[in-house]
Image (cartoon, rainbow, N blue to C red):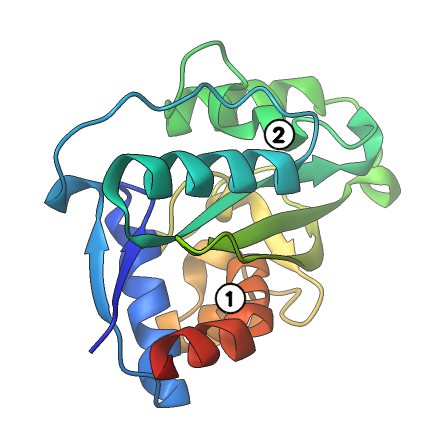
Amino acid sequence: MSTLLIATRNQHKRVELERILAAAGIGLELLDLNSVPPFDEAPETAPDFEGNALDKARDAVRATGLAAVADDSGLAVDALNGMPGVLSARWSGQHGQDKTNLELLLAQVRDVPEERLGAAFVSAAALVRPDGQETVVRGTWPGRLVREPRGTNGFGYDPIFAPLEEPGYTAAELSDERKDELSHRGRALRELLPALRTFAES
């Protein structure tokens, strides 16, 4: 069985990919960054999600010699001209401060009228193989912001994002299965499945 490194320490992302691969019947041994020796990871400085995903996957391949998948994702808010975008994880100044990021975003749109609260989650996923083959895909999940966080089945901005397909719920109120079906990352990873299947069979 081929080994695939997921270039993340985020267990939510690993579990999501495991579910999608299982549903597609693709057998791969998955490792994440917690399973390999530490290496220098370049900062996320690309101007777009695709560039950051590729940089992360390339770093992982160079450091480990394993094929790697990486993603970069974030929330694009219409009223903020697509921000926080690639800065979503560090919108409040420090990486990964979910609660602080969410509270800052809500404060920034406090006076924005309801009709301008459109938003979309965006994910770019990259597969980089040691032989130099690279595949990059994008998934988008349209919806709108709500003003009060709701739900506990999620992270990041999930509690304030109501998807277009389930407007009465936030992303943090959906089941794992429904979120896999709809989410930006789920859509991107499904776009990546043909390349992952080819890798698994090689």
Q: Quadrant of residue 97?
A: top left
**Which residue is drawn at the image coordinates 29% and 20% (left, top)?**
40
Tell which of 130 and 117 is nearer to you. 130
- Looking at the picture, does residue 24 appear above or below residue 182? below
Q: Percent position (x, y) of residue 184?
A: 59, 59
Residue 112 visible: no
**Which residue is drawn at the image coordinates 79% and 26% (left, top)?**
80
Residue matched to label 2: 86
Q: Amino acid at mark 2?
A: Val
Residue matched to label 1: 189
Q: Which mark is residue 6?
A: none
- Distance, label 1 to label 2, CA atoms, is 18 Å
**Which residue is drawn at the image coordinates 48% and 41% (left, top)?**
149
Upstream in the sequence, badge 1 or badge 2? 2
- Looking at the picture, does residue 121 appear above or below residue 184? above
- Looking at the picture, does residue 68 appear above or below residue 182? above
Residue 78 visible: yes
Mark 1 neighbour class, 10 Å CA radius: few under 14, some 14 to 19, many 20 or more: many
Q: Secondary structure at mark 2?
A: helix
